[in-house]
Image: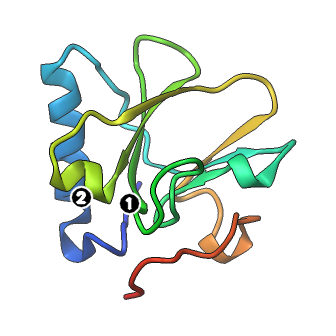
Amino acid sequence: MKFYAPYAGEDSQRVWRLVQSGLARRGRFTTGRRIHALLCLEDSEKSVVVDYDLPGGAADDPVLVIQESSQFPGLVFVQTLDGFQAMREPVALALGEGWRVVDFDEVPPDALPLPAPPRGPQP
């Protein structure tokens, strides 16, 4: 499965592995799943999609990586571009009922019901 973050370009795979290894060093082990989106079926404005701003987060701070915990079902770690650059911890989100996880190879990006369009620079 491929992972591509427009803000990372050709370094997308490297960025994904860097976030994963940083989490592992802190005892937060993740799976090898490449997640493209966390869709909230009840409220699309809560949806989290790679390359879009994190709902409730800072404007113009797109999601760079979403990683799934290997220790706790339903727990994911969301790393934003600013968080990655500042070497901050990813945001931990617990997904309950009403969420759908979309892998990168599952659905073409243009088929996703996306939240508001990104506000950051476009590739």
Residue 7 appears left or right of 91: left
The secondary structure type at the circle numbered 1 is loop
Marks 1 and 2, the one that precedes in the sequence: 1
Residue type beneath disc 1:
Lys
The residue where tag 2 is placed is: 13
Relative to 12, is 22 above or below? Answer: above
Colour scheme of the picture: rainbow
CB within 8 Å, label 1 to label 2:
yes
Q: Residues within 10 Å of mark 2 (few under 14, many from 20)?
A: some
> Looking at the image, which is closer to me, 91 or 38?
91
Q: Which residue: 74% across, 54% down?
A: 45
Residue type beneath disc 2:
Gln
Would you identify the image quadrant in which residue 108 lies?
bottom right
Q: Which residue: 58% across, 21% down?
A: 74
Q: Which residue: 37% across, 88% down?
A: 123
**Residue at mark 1 to residue at mark 2: CA–CA distance:** 8 Å
The secondary structure type at the circle numbered 2 is helix
Q: Which of the image's four quarters has the N terminus?
A: bottom left
Q: Position of residue 39 (x, y in %)?
A: 70, 47
Tag of residue 2 = 1
Q: Position of residue 42 (x, y in %)?
A: 87, 42
Residue 97 appears left or right of 88: right
> Looking at the image, which is closer to me, 119 or 8?
119
**Closer to viewer: mark 1 or mark 2:** 2
Relative to 85, is 73 above or below? Answer: above
